[in-house]
Structure formats: C-alpha cells, structure tokens
Amino acid sequence: MPITVNDRTHDLPDDPRVSLLDFLRGHLGLTGTKKGCDHGQCGACTVLVNGMRINSCLSLAALHDGDAVTTIEGIGTPEDPSALQQAFVEHDGFQCGYCTPGQICSATAMMDEIANGWPSDASAELTGEIKPTPEEIRERMSGNLCRCGAYSNIVQAILATQEAQS
Amino acid sequence: MTVHFKQDEPDTRNLLDQGSQGVIGTAMSRPEGLAKVTGTAPYSAEYRFDDCLVGVLVTAPFTKGRITGIDKETALAMDGVVAVIDDSRMTARPAQGGAGEAPQQSPRQICYYGQPFALVVATSFEKARHAAKHLPFSYEADDVSDIPLDPETAETEAGDGGMQAGDLAHAMATAEHAVDVSYTTMGHASAAMEPHAAIAQWDGGRLTVHASLQMPNYNISELADALDLTEDKVRIVSRYVGGGFGSKLGLSEETTAAALAAMELGKPVKVVMSRQQVFQSIMRRSESSQRVRLAVDAEGRLTGFGHEARVSNLPGEEFAEPVLQSSAFLYAGENRLLALDVARIHQMTAGSVRAPGEAIGMPVLEAAMDCLAEEAGIDPVELRLRNIPEKDPGKGLPFTTHELADCLKKGAEAFGWDSGPRKPRQNRDGEWWIGTGMASAARVHNVAEAKARVTLNADGTARVQSDMTDIGTGTYAILTQIAAEMLGLDPANVMVELGDTDFPRGPGSGGSWGAVSIGSAVVIACDAIRQSLAKKAGIDADDLKLKDGKLQGSQPRSLSELLDGGNMSEEGHYEPGDISDDYTSSSFGAFFAQVRVNRHTGETRVDRMLGAFGFGRVLNEKTARSQCLGGMVWCIGSALTEALHFDPVDGHLVNCDLAEYHVPVHRDVPDLEVMLVESRDPAASAVQGKGVGELGMCGGAGAIANAVYNACGARLFEFPMTPDKVLADMPD
Ligand code: FES
Ligand code: FES
C-alpha cells in the first residue's frame, strides 16, 4: 500500500534505510518538517501519523505502509493558516523559525491529547478532565526544543488558541 | 548613489523620530512570520536543484597527529559513491567571527578530536552516510600523554582586556568589608536548532552557495580565500538561518567542502552536518576559572575591584573568551586589576557562543557581588546602586546613555523585591526551599560598518536590500519598520530582501550589533530619498511629511504621482567613527529571579524571572522582547544544566548531542517577564539604539545562583549548579 501525505498518495522509497523524515524532506520536497538532530532529541521533525505526533526521524519510511501523515504543509498555508499558526505569528512564538513547524505539529496533536483526557506528569489526577494549564502545556511540549528560547510566547500562543476554541 | 555617514559624534538629528507613519518601535509581527509557521521559509539545505549530490563529512577519531592515507578506491566501489574529496583547501575548523580570511586548512593535520578531513559524495544521503562510516584511512596519532588537554596545567598566554590601577592588594587589606572568591564555569555549545548546512553550485566560472551563515559579508572573503577565488566569483545566500548564537559567524567546514566538491564534480553538492559533528567540530564556549576580589568602605562603596580569568583555546587561535569585558566599566573602585589568561589545549576550537565574555563573566561577578552584599550587610540592589560609576573607571570616558540604575529600580519594583534583611532558608513549601536573587546585566555595545540599498519604486512601494541576515533576531521586521517610518509607507508596501552577497554588504549578525548598524544604513539611505523627494516637491526636507504613501500638506499628493513613473534608489553606508574614543557604550539591565530548591534532591526550578533592559531605542517591541526572553532562557540553561564534558584522557567531547547536553526545555522555563526601559542614545548609532541580542543572558545566571543561596543556603562557586553540587553544599 502507498503512504498518504497531506491527502496525497506516494510510493514508498526503494532504499529501506530512508527515514520518514528524509522521505518527506528529500523525496517529497516537504521541507517544512525540519531535521535538528536525527536522533529523537529535539522534536523539530514532529509530524502527525494517523493523527498522533511522532518524531519522524526515529521511524523508517518503509514502516508507514498505508499510514496517513500530516506535515506542517498539511496544517495550513500562508494563504490559509490554522488558528494556531496565526497565533504563533501574533505572539511571536518563534525567532529563527527552525523548531516552529515541529512545535506547531506537536501542539496540534497535544491539544487533542488533552481533550481526550490523557494524563501527563503535570496532571493532578490520572483520570477525568484535564485542564490546559500553562504547566500542563509546558510538560507536554517539552519534547520540542527551542534554542531561540521562544517558550513563553509559544505557551501564550497555544493558550490563546485553546481559549478561542473553547 | 551612495550616501556615507561616519559617526564621529552623537547623531542628534534623531531622524527616526521625525517620521509620521507611527510604526517604528511598535509590536509589529514579523513579515516573514507566516512563511516560518507554515514551513515555507526555505533554510539552506532546502533548495531543490536537479542532480544534487549529497556529501557526508568524515572526522578524525583521535586528538592530534595526521591522516597518512585514505583508501578512495574502496569507497568508490561502494553503492552510489561518486567521489571522496580530501582537497588540501578544505577547512579544518570554523573561522572566528569577523576573520575575513580562511581558517586553518590542511585538513590531514589533525588538531582536535572530531576534526573533519574528508568528504564522501554519493547519489543519496543514505549511501554517502554508509560510505563515510566505512571509509578506510590510516593515521599516525600523537601519544595522548604528550598532548596538553587540561587548561589548569597547560601553558598560558596573556589575553586582551587586562589592566591595573592603584593597589588592589592594599585596598583588600584595608577594606571595611571584602570578598575574595573563585569560581569555575563549564563550556557551552551554541546548539542552534538548524545544523550547519550548505548547497554549492559551480557553473564553471562562479560559485553559488546557499549556506547557513550569520555574516555573509565576512564569509564571502573567508570562502574566496579558502578556495583561491576572487570574491566576484563567489555568491553566498543565507535568507533564513535556523539560529546561530555565534556558531555560524565564521565559515564552517561543510561549506568549504561542499564548494570544493561542486567545483570538482560540476554538479550541485549538499552537505549537512550531523548534530554530533556540529557539537564536535564547530565552536565551544571556553570553560573558565575566575577570581573576583571586591573591597568596600563602610558605606559599601567599592575601593578595590579585581577580576581575573583563565580560559582556553587551541594553539594559534586568536580568540579568547573576553570574560572581563563588562567588568572593565560596570562598577566603581579606584584600585583595579583585570587579567585574562588563555591556556593552549587541544580541544575543539573555542569561539563565540552567544554573548562571549559577559555570558560567564557577568554571572560570576554578580554572584560575587551577592557575597559582598551579605558580608557588608547591604541590600544587593542598593549595593549596586551605590557603585554605579560616573565615568568608565578604567578609561575615564563618559558613558553614552546609562540605564543601570533605572533598570535596577524599575525591575525591583515590578518584581516586588523585598529590600529587608536577607537571610537564607527563610521560606519553605513542603520539600522545597524558596528564595530570590538578583543581578545586574551589562553587555558592551558595538557597531559595525553596514551598507543597504533602498529603492522607492514608481508605484509607491519600497525595497530594502543587504546581505545582512535575520537569524531569528527580527531583521526583516525592523528594517521594514525603519523604511516604512522614514518613507511614510504602510509596512505591507515595504519588501526587505536579505542574506545575499549580490546585495550591498551589511554588518552581519553577531556581537548584538546587527540591528542598529544595518538600521543606521537604512535610515541614511531613506534620508537621502527624502531629500530627493523634498526637492521634487519643491519644499524644505524638514517640512516633508510622508504618511500612508502620501506627501501630507494642504494638498496631499501620492508618492507615485510625485515619482512620475521613475524610482529613487540610494545606498546607505554607515561607518563607525572616532566616537568610540570619546565614550564607553554598553546596554544595561537587571535580573530578578525566584527559585525553588528541593531539599532532598538538590533540584532547582526557576519559578519566576524578570528582566528589565535598557538599550536606547526599541525598534520593535515584540522582537526586542523576544530577544530578551531568549537570553533569559539561556540564563536558566547556563545556571542549571548546560555543560560540555570533555574526556580528560583524549580531550574529546563526550556529550555531543541534545540528549546529553541539556538546553532548557519548555518545562524548565516559567512565564518570563521582560520590561523594556526605553531611551534615545544618539552616541550609540544613527537609530539611537544599542545592542539587545545578547543582553538578556549577561548576568541572569548570577541572579539564579543568588536565589539558590537565598533559598537553601548552598553558596555555589561553580556553574552550572546541577543537583549534585547543590545537594553537596546544602546545609543539613
Ligand atoms: S530531528 Fe527528529 S527529534 Fe530531532
Ligand atoms: S525559533 Fe529558533 S529554535 Fe525555536
């Protein structure tokens, strides 16, 4: 079966060593997904696979037979950005912009995880409704490094989007 | 036309405040923001060229010696391998910021563990990586016991920045209160999120390189020198740079290697360093050992001030972490001693990492000031206020604007600083000790030569062009605002094009000088256009009011009407002048922090942190604030977690990735507060502003150290203050 990326289907690469990240960036030209470490240590390569966030550098493309992948390009475009993308611009949730697609993909899935009641280390209870507090967001976003240090603004952008949507 | 302005004296024309558009200083969002958040902004490795080959660097697995042979045949027999490049022109270490000439070449001579010496080029990344990993080569390594690796025992040379006045020893002996304290700080990595990357193309006569570099204006000279080409045969493009923090100031190894490969093979070649290669073969901030001596009289006024430091670098490297840079002028004290030593060791190159000098000098000085405040029984804010000198105590020069007192007072008030008696271990919440601390901030202000072209088009839009970069600093935003303000345009009608050496030479992004230097060049170009417009309109330039694309007055006329189908183009050229002989100039600020320290584990969490910063004019409130926020995040990292660990046996960097080198993550950073204490500094630049890019990390780690002591009573003399060290020093 082919792989679906942002609603378009593609054949998987011949070389089994190609990571999902390199497949997206190199083979499909979807360079919005970034490579910061290639070792699952920075989150710059975060994409959604079947709606869940993963580090695409830690996964071989060949393993995604039949999967549906959403990258930053599938989340919004300059002409039609998502609410979260717009909030990042408004709140200056980035500086150099290199970690940014990963932050946004990660936060998009993270908001669903909170809505679905998945607990985290910052949650008071393991069950029941989870409130999207700043601490809850910081904990859940800690896999996405930002060396420019835009963290405070990123949290503000996520909170503003959460509030507007609820 | 080129309009030249050399700043020999304060620029009191204050041109930016004459504009009518009302956009300068505002919190305008970045014009390139949508491109960044949608992943459509192209970084250096992301340009698509037909038949692009991929190169992977091969690095030395030993510390010092030479590569004696490379078995290219075996590599070339591997799947997809096109070439093994081991040209003697490859660069073996990065150029220092502003070098303007090639760094060390002859890559087969190995001077540090992890030095690149060859490039394997193949048809795909996977194939190149495989072949690079299995490339057979032979080498002769020097005996590690003969290689100097320990900065404490290696031979030293005197570095810049030393000075002596009066008799510090006597001042210490006769002081009412004195402290004599020694500290160590560990090395840091820039760890910009985008690894170093380049794609080179050679058309047989000219080289074009898309590379992630902070200073194309210097990098073009460095690359041309390395390749024995004239500069007109080289073009560097760096439109988006995924963070630099000093690591991309100078030409780095992948760019030269990609260029040589493209020239040899006649095809585009892309080389991206792995994260481990970035850590091991780009710049480290030197570790340091520092001694601070402070002597005060009964009123708490400094009579003696001593700051000595030892840092390290490779033999022959000129750069020495300028630890004492702000100590030279920050506080009073007629008996002064400053001294810097550089130990020569064979670890990777030491160079600029965000705020070289102050990043480690200021936290140490500010931690020592806290010891002094306790010793003298004076509130730490008050102690600093009492010791702000009238003039630079070393050089006797007046300061340009001096915002320290303002920042200390405003910051203390906003933070809710308690100026009552301070004792550690007064506040506990369960297993957490809670405490506060503060520190001053200072970062020397620099400007650099800068050129920019501004074109006012016939349709009333404008274009700004320079090879200046935006490394996340906000250059696209502030130049849009400056041109819009000066020419009376909606910012949406200003297009800024950066990072291309085919445009006029900018100052490069580094040393916090970028915004004010290139901003000054744009002001100068726009002013010349304003003069021409006034002439055309037949009015005095002083009476020219431009707003929303129109000449204001009793009968408003649109700019396009005035331009009558033509355009106007001017190149602004800003040059630093003799004014630096007349003034000492620095940006200033104050940090306040509240921390929690776990009494069982020694873990420190920053609960709250506020920074008040004064750097003259604020060009964009949003991006300036972001620069300060970023700096404060670096304060948290350098205070608590960031440390390069080198193997004492062979000097290789052990923690060369982001799992083991701990930069702050989301949960380490509370909602930081930034106050911008604005003024106009006409002696600092033609935009009346000073540098801000690094100020936010110049001292804040000291505020955190002081808060740790106030919380739990652990007085630490080493950075970072990891839990093991805090716990070892915490009273029972
Ligand atoms: S590139 Fe995948 S986590 Fe860093
Ligand atoms: S914006 Fe530069 S790393 Fe996050």
Image (cartoon, coloured by chain):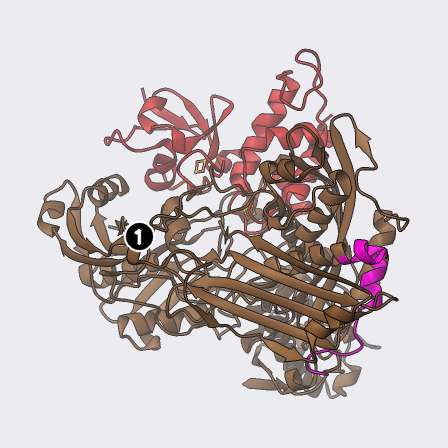
Chain colours: A red, B brown
Q: Nearer the viewer, residue B724 or B205?
A: B724
Q: Position of residue B138 (x, y in %)?
A: 15, 51
Q: What number of labels is visible?
A: 1
The answer to whether residue B381 is magenta is yes
Q: Residue furthest front?
A: B173
Q: Quadrant of residue A140?
A: top right
Q: Quadrant of residue B402?
A: bottom right
Position of B177 relative to B430 (above/below) = below
The answer to whether residue B586 is magenta is no
Q: Is residue B558 visible?
A: no
Q: Quadrant of the C terminus of chain B?
A: top right
Q: Residue furthest top?
A: A127
Chain for disc number 1: B
Q: Residues within 10 Å of mark 1 (few under 14, many from 20)?
A: many
Position of B157 relative to B374 (above/below) = below
Determine the quadrant in which ligand 1 lies: top left
Q: Is residue B731 visible?
A: yes
Q: Nearer the viewer, residue B563 or B484?
A: B484
- Secondary structure beneath dot 1 equals strand
Position of B368 relative to A151 (above/below) = below
Kindly identify the amino acid type of the residue bearing the numbered disc 1: Lys
**Mark 1 lies on residue:** B270
Q: Quadrant of residue A152?
A: top right
Q: Position of residue B662 (x, y in %)?
A: 53, 41
Q: Is residue B209 left or right of residue B488?
A: left
Q: Position of residue B53 (x, y in %)?
A: 25, 50
Q: Position of residue B396 (x, y in %)?
A: 72, 83
Q: Nearer the viewer, residue B395 or B687?
A: B395
Q: Quadrant of the N terminus of chain B?
A: bottom right
Magenta extent = B372-396
Q: Is residue B582 left or right of residue B542?
A: left
